[in-house]
Image (cartoon, grey):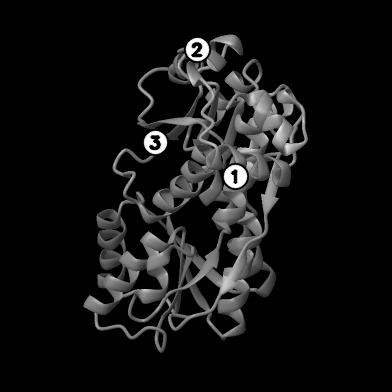
Amino acid sequence: MKLADLAALAGVSTATVSRALAGHSSVNEQTRERIRVLAREHDVRPNQLARNLRMKSTGAIGLVLPLGHAKTQHLTDPFFLSLLGFLADLLVERGYDILLSRVIPDADDWLERLVDSGRIDGLLLVGQSDQFAAIERVSQRYRPLIVWGANRPGQHHLTIGSDNVAGGRLAAEHLIAQGRQRLLFVGDPAPPEFADRLAGFAAAADEAGVAYTVLATPMSPEAVHAAVATHLAGGTVPDAIFAASDVAAMSALRALAEAGIDVPTTTSVIGYDDVSLAAHTSPSLTTIRQDLAIGAELMVDRLLKRVAGEPAESAIVPPALIKRQSA
C-alpha cells in the first residue's frame, strides 16, 4: 500500500499522511494517532532515508546532559533517568532517533560543535549547569534548542522547568508550619535551578524570621553524605533539612541515621524532584514534585514546533508538596 492509498482510507491528503507519520505538529494529535494506527494495520513504512534527504533532515534529536558543575553526576541519577525516559518515549513515538550524550564541557565551543555537527535536527538539553552563557549564545542563531532548566528575566533561550523558587518556598513554609526553627539547606547553590530553590527557601524563612544555614556541597551522594555527617559531628543539629534534590535528601537521611538522630522527631527532611525511590526510603521522603511527564511533553512539543519553523515559548511547570513520613 502506498501513502496515497493510506490517505484515501484516512480521508485526508497524502501530504497530511506524510506529516502525520513524521510526527509534525501541524497535524492534530487525534489525526496523527488515527493515521499511525492505519499505517500499522496495513504495514505502511515510509522510506525514512528518502524522506530525510528530501527534507534535509537527519531524523535524529540530540538529548544531552551538560555537566560543567557536577562531573561526578551520572546518567544513572534517578531524576535524569526519569526525564530521559519520558523524552525518549515521546521522540520515538514521533519517529525520531535519539543521540544521547553526557557532556563535560571541555572548551567554550562545545555546544556549537554539537549543533553544527549535521547529525541532529534539534537539541534537548537537560539542565543548564554552569553553561548558561554558552546556551544563551548558541540559542541566538540555533532555534531548535530547548532546555530543561531555570528561566531568567530577559533570557533568549527557551526553557521548560519547574518553578524552583515556588518549590523552595513550599518546602520552607511546610517546615516552619511544623514549628521548625533551625533550617539547613543542603546542596550546590551554583546551578540556576538549585540557586532558585535556595532563593525561595531563604525568602520564606526570612519573612517568617526563622534562621537558616546553607551547607554547600557537590551533589554526588557520597559528597552530600560526607558533608552532612561532618556538619552533624560538629555538634550542630538542625531541626529541618531541605535538600536540593531527592538523591541529596536520601544521603542526608543516611547521615542522620548513622548519627542516631530520629527523623522526623528531631529533624525533618524534605527533598526535591519526587523520584520513584522517594516513596520507598525509611522513613518515606517528603519532597517537592516536578511533573516530569508534563515537562517532557512540553519540551518535545516546543522542539518540534521550532524544528518546523513555528513559534514556541518557554513554559513553567508548577511544583507540588508531596507529604510523607520524613516531614
Answer left or right for 304 relative to 283.
right
Q: Secondary structure at mark 3?
A: loop
Above-or-below relation of 84 to 283:
above
Amino acid identity at mark 1? Val
Q: What residue would you read off at disc 2?
A: 116
Image quarter for residue 27?
A: top right
Query: Between marks 1 and 2, how big is the CA–CA gap?
Result: 35 Å
Answer left or right for 110 relative to 261.
right
Can residue 157 be seen here? The reply is: no
- Of residue 231 and residue 54, the one placed in the foreground of this image is 54
Which of the two discs, 3 and 2, labels the residue nearer the N terminus? 3
Quadrant the N terminus occupies? top right
Query: Between marks 3 and 1, how big is the CA–CA gap?
Result: 40 Å
Q: Secondary structure at mark 2?
A: loop
Q: What residue would you read off at disc 1?
A: 37
Q: Position of residue 178 (x, y in %)?
A: 57, 85
Residue 67 disc label: 3
